[in-house]
Image (tube, rainbow, N blue to C red):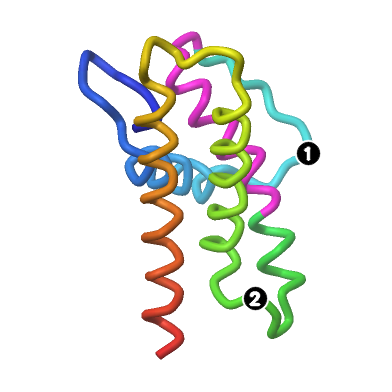
Amino acid sequence: MVAYRAGAPILAGQFLSEVDRLARSLPPCRHVLNACTDRYHFAVGLAAVLGGGGWAVEAQGNKGGEKHPVLQNSMRQLEGIKDRLQKAPTDFGGHREKAVDAISHAISELKQAIQFDNK
């Protein structure tokens, strides 16, 4: 679980799906103004802009290196988020452990997806 929206949990897969959908719809640019007043939408927009640029660079510069650079980059981003959560000075009202578990599960699913495609 990455967030709550209207009282319902938003899982990492849903968040990443929304980030990916938005990133694909954005034009290439160097500067972005994220004017979202909703915190969740702001987070999706921020991740789409930051991740979108990284994905595009990685995908273009891949040249036979990593297979599925979008998934590989998503795993790296999730690992960074997980690390920051684990080092946070608070447990966020008991939600940190559940979030770390959800992120670990998402990373595992991405690894399995890549392994499945490598067969």
In the image, residue 21 above or below residue 35: below
10 Å crowding of disc 1: few (<14), some (14-19), many (20+): few
Q: x and y percent of residue 48 in the render? A: 56, 39
Q: Residue at x 66, y 39 (%)?
A: 50
Q: Which residue has dot 1 on it? A: 30
Residue 35 drawn in magenta: no
Numbered range of the magenta stretch: 37-54
Who's the residue at 54% across and 30% down the image? 45
Q: Contact, CB < 8 Å: mark 2 with mark 1? A: no
Among the two numbered marks 2 and 1 on one chain, the one whose residue lies closer to the N terminus = 1
Judging depth in this view, the residue of 119 and 98 nearest the camera is 98
Instruction: Say which of 87 and 14 sits in front.
Output: 87
Residue 111 — which label? Answer: none
Taking the spot 32% from the left edge, 37% from the top edge, the residue there is 11
Residue 12 location, x and y as percent?
Answer: 38, 40
Which residue shows up at 63% across the image and 41% down it?
A: 80
